[in-house]
């Protein structure tokens, strides 16, 4: 509780210190000398940016969160940019040859619109090829929709050093645009007739650039990431690696009033995705290479190199014979843990920001957690071991509390089924007497807790221990083994003729093979018959230390950080190894999969410094047969659909269902409702009952009734409390308006409706845990990694409905009350208690006739609340008809509490639950 308050207070201070001075009208620090000149490339303008700078973002607290924290970008290069947006006829002539896409332009000189980001990428590459320039974008395959628009590119990569056509970066676009920015003379909401116009046809000065303001919004190259408030050089934005990543569009469109167009704006009214297209979104091109490009991650850490998956799920399935593949590794540029989830068609990459240095991560046998240490093999530094959940945020971090150092964790399942972590007290040089003074230990891990450590033997055998515990290996700087005799005595031996060895890993299939790397020694040269150099051969010995196999690296790279693949494996995976590949500059550029059957090497991920990979696979075998459920639908509770009006609600609901399956056996209370309960109830603060908050934006009692009937009652055996948000205005809604809409657009919920049974629930739950959902789709600016809102005060008591027509006797209201009655009846049948809660609203609603923004009148609202109370439902009313004690600081707007209000609300709800006469 204390830590939570400290975080909230720090966030409050940051908001109070922020300024509100910038209007975004001009942000360049460039001198007023010549900026543009004619370009030899037809249709292009050369921009003299080298030595100049531009400021991205604003200090205006009314702007979107990722538009704040102004950041200066310095240029060390010049570039060229299109005079106007790409013409539809030019686009059609090129794209018709590539993919068959033809937009059938209405007339000449109209800008191309209704295209995805990837359509623009294809066009840029094609134009580069046509002019004999470099391709700036690379990809392994593309996915087209029925109209032949490109919706996704697998293995997508942007190469800033390439000299070819591309989309301009946000910084390039901004620098050029602010020289000619004039929204008043643009095609806009006031003069456009809500349609696009021919390029360069507005009243603006078009000597060099046209339509930077208005006409069409324009795609730029950047992935969307928050600014860091500092200074960057040659900034190229966030990383682009998924069709669910939010993009950046600039300039305003014919939909916008001139007063709504700001240079700093980066999007539309709703998030724009790379698979999105609209009749008011087009693009212009830039060309020229970008030296020493700098990226920015979504959590504001500077990344010199993006992490890019190079294979999709289908390709990896062929390599591993598995639907279930997960990869973790250390990003040595940021010191963070990176998690790649291959459960969906396009792998999702998550970098878990932390202050803890991550080394040697290893995925647990069930694939749900990851253990890691804080120092590396070969170091004598003090180290600690941690375990955290393997998800997008790395929840539930747990530290092993022991005296002294603990390093190189390796998971192991004992013959009795217990899961333990084997570790050593040091992974420093094992070629000396200090090795025997160190020791090897194991510690149980269950229910997110460490047990009591137990010493196994002297010697730091950090390369692994066999299932029968009769072989243990170590490697830094010698290939050292502890071999147990039939009598039970352990003998320490040094294999490989005592030559230098490292990156030792003992197989996990019972074969007792050990893989390692060497330094191009005589023994390896003799075995392979080649004079290879350091780390150019992957070597394997048998249980007696005899060399039995070697695999050469691929041209231009060396191996490092070799590890056997782990997980639930059958024979086909017993010959798979994961490694880092270092390039000629000694940078660990790739993570690769090595197949010992044919000595093939397959690049999986590309980046700058990718260390210590752990690849987990679950294959079908006798104990884990081929899934009986459809992996493309089971547990997939959200799939992006541009037509989904309530996309933010869909993401929230999907995240809740994933958490439901994860915590269903622990849950003791569950809450349903809209964003009002979602933002008010803080799950970790509920001490009386383990609570799941399943509120979603615009959610209602119909959705709550559906979730209770189909998920909670059949599959959450320990739930005793049902909390239902009672918002009278949301009773004026049919099932199909929101609940039905969300359910019918959730592949997983539709699948569950037909296939969820006691027999399939575990498999569905298993698939659901592999899903990760895009938080950038949320409609509200939540505090990071929460559903809590910053404080802005109670603001104006808005009313969005005609309350004169909202009477209590309407059939639609009775259907809502019947849904609450159904919840009560189901709860009673299972011995559960139902609580109806009313969260605080703006006290100023007392000065109006309305209960809140959604109505009805206060008189009708009181009548409806009484009807619910008459059902025998306990009313927890924190609104008290506006006579409450929630201050301005406790409010986010007229009908949502801020995080400070959420603390007070949750404490009071928790206190109420403690008084209920219910046996836990």
Image: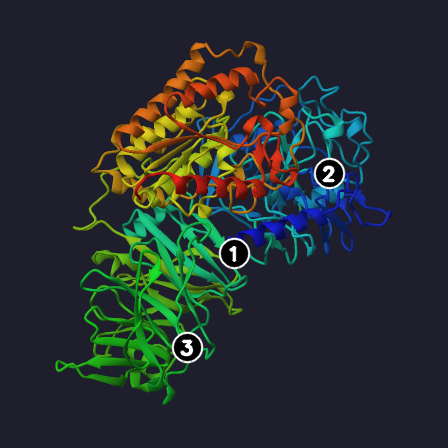
User: In the picture provided, is 60 more to the left or to the right than 270?
Assistant: right
Q: Secondary structure at mark 2?
A: loop
Frontmost residue, 353 versus 584? 353
The coloring applied to the image is rainbow
For disc 2, the marked residue is: 263
Tell us which disc is closer to us: 3 or 2.
3
> Is mark 3 in CB contact (under 8 Å) with mark 2?
no
Circle 1 Cα neighbour tier, 10 Å, few/some/many (<14 / 14–19 / ≥20): some
One can see residue 720 in this view: yes
| Count of number-bearing discs | 3
One can see residue 529 in this view: no
Q: Position of residue 55 (x, y in %)?
A: 74, 48
Which residue sits at x=53%, y=26%?
Answer: 102
Residue 15 vertical placement versus 215 (above, below): below
For disc 1, the marked residue is: 353
The quadrant holding residue 758 is top left
Circle 2 Cα neighbour tier, 10 Å, few/some/many (<14 / 14–19 / ≥20): many
User: In the picture provided, is 401 more to the left or to the right than 480?
Assistant: right
Q: Position of residue 860 (x, y in %)?
A: 52, 15
The quadrant holding residue 486 is bottom left
Image quadrant for the C terminus?
top left
Q: Earlier in the sequence, mark 3 or mark 2?
A: 2
For disc 3, the marked residue is: 404
Frontmost residue, 107 versus 603? 603
Q: Secondary structure at mark 1?
A: loop
User: In the picture provided, is 298 more to the left or to the right than 535?
Assistant: right
Which residue sits at x=38%, y=37%?
Answer: 670
Q: Position of residue 336 (x, y in %)?
A: 50, 60
Q: Earlier in the sequence, mark 1 or mark 2?
A: 2
Q: Position of residue 84 (x, y in %)?
A: 71, 33
């Amino acid at each position: 509780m204390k830590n939570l308050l400290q975080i909230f207070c720090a966030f409050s201070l940051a908001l109070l210190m922020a300024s509100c001075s910038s209007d975004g009208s001009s942000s360049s620090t460039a001198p007023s000398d010549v900026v543009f000149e004619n370009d030899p490339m037809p249709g292009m303008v050369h921009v003299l940016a080298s030595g100049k700078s531009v400021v991205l973002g604003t200090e205006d607290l009314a702007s979107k969160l990722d538009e704040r924290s102004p950041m200066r970008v310095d240029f060390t290069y010049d570039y060229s940019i299109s005079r106007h947006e790409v013409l539809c006829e030019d686009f059609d002539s090129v794209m018709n040859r590539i993919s068959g896409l033809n937009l059938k332009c209405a007339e000449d000189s109209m800008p191309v619109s209704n295209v995805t980001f990837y359509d623009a990428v294809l066009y840029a590459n094609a134009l580069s090829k046509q002019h004999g320039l470099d391709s700036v974008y690379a990809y392994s395959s593309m996915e087209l929709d029925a109209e032949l628009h490109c919706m996704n590119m697998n293995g997508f990569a942007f190469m800033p050093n390439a000299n070819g056509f591309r989309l301009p970066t946000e910084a390039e676009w901004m620098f050029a645009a602010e020289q000619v920015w004039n929204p008043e003379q643009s095609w806009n909401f006031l003069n456009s007739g809500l349609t696009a116009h021919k390029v360069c046809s507005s009243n603006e000065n078009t000597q060099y650039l046209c339509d930077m303001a208005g006409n069409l919004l324009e795609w730029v190259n950047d992935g969307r990431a928050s600014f860091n408030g500092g200074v960057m050089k040659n900034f190229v934005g966030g990383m682009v690696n998924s069709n669910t990543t939010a993009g950046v569009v600039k300039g305003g469109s014919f939909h916008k009033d001139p007063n709504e167009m700001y240079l700093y704006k980066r999007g539309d009214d709703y998030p724009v995705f790379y698979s999105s297209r609209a009749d008011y979104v087009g693009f212009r091109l830039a060309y020229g290479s970008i030296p020493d490009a700098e990226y920015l991650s979504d959590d504001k850490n500077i990344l010199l190199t993006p992490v890019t998956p190079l294979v999709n799920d289908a390709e990896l399935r062929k390599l591993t014979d598995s639907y279930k593949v997960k990869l973790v590794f250390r990003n040595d540029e940021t010191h963070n843990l990176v998690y790649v989830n291959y459960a969906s068609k396009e792998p999702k990459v998550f970098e878990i920001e932390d202050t803890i240095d991550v080394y040697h991560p290893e995925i647990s046998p069930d694939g749900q957690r990851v253990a890691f240490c804080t120092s590396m093999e070969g170091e004598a530094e003090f180290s600690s071991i941690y375990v955290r959940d393997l998800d997008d945020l790395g929840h539930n971090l747990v530290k092993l509390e022991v005296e002294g150092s603990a390093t190189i964790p390796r998971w192991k399942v004992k013959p009795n089924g217990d899961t333990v972590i084997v570790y050593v007290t040091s992974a420093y040089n094992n070629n000396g007497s200090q090795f025997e003074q160190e020791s090897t230990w194991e510690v149980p891990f269950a229910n997110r807790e460490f047990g009591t450590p137990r010493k196994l033997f002297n010697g730091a055998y950090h390369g692994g221990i066999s299932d029968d515990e009769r072989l243990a290996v170590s490697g830094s700087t010698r290939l050292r083994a502890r071999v147990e005799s039939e009598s039970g005595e352990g003998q320490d031996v040094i294999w490989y003729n005592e030559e230098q060895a490292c990156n030792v890993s003992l197989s996990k299939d019972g074969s007792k093979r050990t893989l390692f790397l060497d330094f191009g020694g005589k023994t390896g040269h003799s075995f392979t018959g080649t004079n290879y150099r350091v780390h150019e051969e992957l070597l394997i010995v048998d249980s007696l230390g005899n060399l039995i196999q070697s695999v050469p690296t691929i041209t231009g790279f060396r191996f490092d950080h070799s590890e056997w693949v782990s997980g639930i494996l059958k024979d086909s995976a017993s010959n798979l190894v994961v490694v880092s590949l270092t390039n000629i500059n000694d940078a660990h550029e790739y993570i690769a999969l090595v197949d010992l059957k044919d000595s093939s090497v397959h690049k999986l991920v590309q980046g700058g410094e990718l260390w210590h990979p752990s690849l987990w696979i679950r294959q079908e075998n006798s104990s884990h047969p081929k899934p009986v459920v459809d992996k493309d639908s089971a547990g997939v509770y959200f799939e992006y659909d541009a037509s989904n009006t309530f996309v933010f609600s869909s993401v929230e609901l999907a995240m809740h269902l994933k958490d439901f399956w994860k915590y269903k056996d622990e849950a003791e209370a569950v809450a349903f409702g809209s964003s009002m309960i979602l933002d008010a109830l803080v799950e970790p603060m509920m001490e009386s009952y383990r609570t799941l908050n399943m509120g979603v934006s615009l959610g209602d009692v119909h959705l709550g009734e559906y979730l209770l009937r189909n998920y909670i009652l059949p599959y959450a055996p320990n739930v005793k409390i049902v909390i239902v948000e009672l918002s009278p205005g949301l009773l004026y809604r049919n099932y199909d308006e929101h609940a039905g809409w969300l359910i019918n657009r959730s592949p997983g919920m539709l699948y569950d409706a037909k296939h969820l049974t006691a027999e399939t629930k575990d498999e569905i739950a298993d698939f659901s845990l592999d899903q990760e959902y895009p938080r950038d789709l949320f409609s509200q600016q939540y505090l990071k990694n929460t559903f809590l809102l910053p404080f802005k005060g109670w603001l104006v008591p808005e009313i969005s409905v005609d309350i004169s027509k909202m009477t209590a006797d309407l059939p639609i209201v009775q259907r809502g009350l019947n849904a609450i009655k159904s919840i009560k009846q189901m709860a009673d049948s299972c011995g559960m208690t139902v609580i109806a809660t009313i969260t605080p609203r703006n006290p100023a609603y007392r000065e109006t006739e309305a209960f809140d923004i959604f109505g009805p009148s206060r008189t009708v609202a009181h009548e409806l609340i009484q009807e619910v109370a008459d059902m025998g439902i306990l009313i927890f009313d924190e609104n008290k008809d506006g006579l409450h004690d929630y201050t301005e600081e406790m409010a986010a707007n007229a009908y949502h509490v801020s995080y400070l209000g959420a603390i007070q609300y949750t404490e009071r709800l928790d206190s109420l639950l403690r008084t209920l006469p219910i046996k836990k």
